Amino acid sequence: MASETLLCLENLSYVYPDGTPALRDLNLEIRAGETWLVAGVPGAGKSTLLRHLNGLLRPTAGRVLLRGADINRDKKALRAARAAVGLALQFPEQQLFAPTVGEDIAFAPRRQGLNEEETAERVEEARLMADLPPEVLPRSPQTLSGGEKRRAALAGIIAARPSVLALDEPLAGLDPLTSRRLLVRLREWRDGAERALIIVTHDIEEAAPLAERLLVLRTEKTALTGRLPQALLQAETGLPPPVMTRLAQGLAARGVPVRQDIPTVDGMAAHLSALFAPDKEL
């Protein structure tokens, strides 16, 4: 049974007010249960794309459909899109405004009309999902580190229970261990209901284990889409080959028959362990 289509972009184009083109004839279908990674050089339109998904920007041409309805059709459709699509901006300071982190996370549930008990449940659920320690809740957002601010802003969005999370560089400023934990939590969030994730990231290899599909935006060129991890190996994406692919190519040049289509460290470690098992002959 096919998953529900949550978002659909139809021939989406956008031109900045100064006449600079940002997006051109972009077509994309995002289904429940999917995670899309969005990559591209600076200026290719990645952040601009995310701002179209909940109506912060209006297309110059084309449409954004939420469950088949044009989100820019009227004010009611636009409100529905902003409730369904949670957008985490690249700079979390733009989204943290309450006196304390706890109040910031509670803002959306209260605005949705939930009582204090229900709101507290949402805050705790979002705190755990964003991997925030409980002692952060009474603190001012201004006292947090960059990584904590990013996760606090994410928690505030999760508390609203959107159907789609669109995240702009969610791993920036996080140490490797925290990044891995956050990716696990995001997978749990996605798999907990009919939801989808869209992640803009410069670290494609780190986020790849979470995702199934890749969108590459290219300045002045048509966007490319593909399935992960195979898409990372396509030269036409313009992305550098994954580190593990370069390792495999080096080993292959020395006569070791290593697969070159494994982009993650964990995947390559398992492959090499199997390849060099005691009873395995090269």
Image: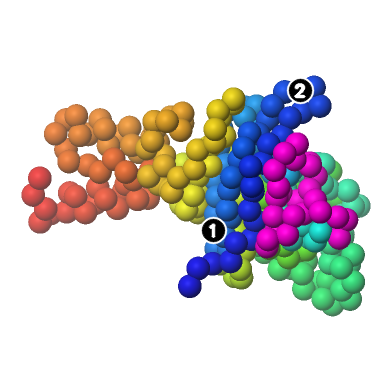
Residue 88 or residue 69, whichever sits in front: 69
Q: Is residue 175 left or right of residue 247?
A: right
Q: Which portion, as a residue range, is magenta?
A: 53-76
From the viewer's perspective, is 239 left or right of 42?
Answer: left
Q: How many marks?
A: 2
Residue to which mark 2 is pinned: 19
* Place of residue 276 in the rendered image (x, y in percent of width and height, measured from the top left): 17, 49
Q: Can you identify the residue that label 1 sits on?
A: 34
In the image shown, does 27 or 280 lie closer to the viewer?
A: 27
Q: Which structural element holds mark 2?
A: loop
Q: Residue at x 64, y 47 (%)?
A: 10
Q: Quadrant of residue 108?
A: bottom right
- Residue 91 location, x and y as percent? 75, 39
Residue 202 percent across, percent down from the top left: 56, 36
> Within the magenta stretch, is there residue 50?
no
**Residue at image x 26%, y 32%?**
249
The Cα–Cα distance between marks 2 and 1, rounded to whole angstroms, is: 34 Å
Image point (57%, 42%), residue name = 38
How is the structure coloured here?
A: rainbow
**Residue 234 image-quadrant placement:** top left
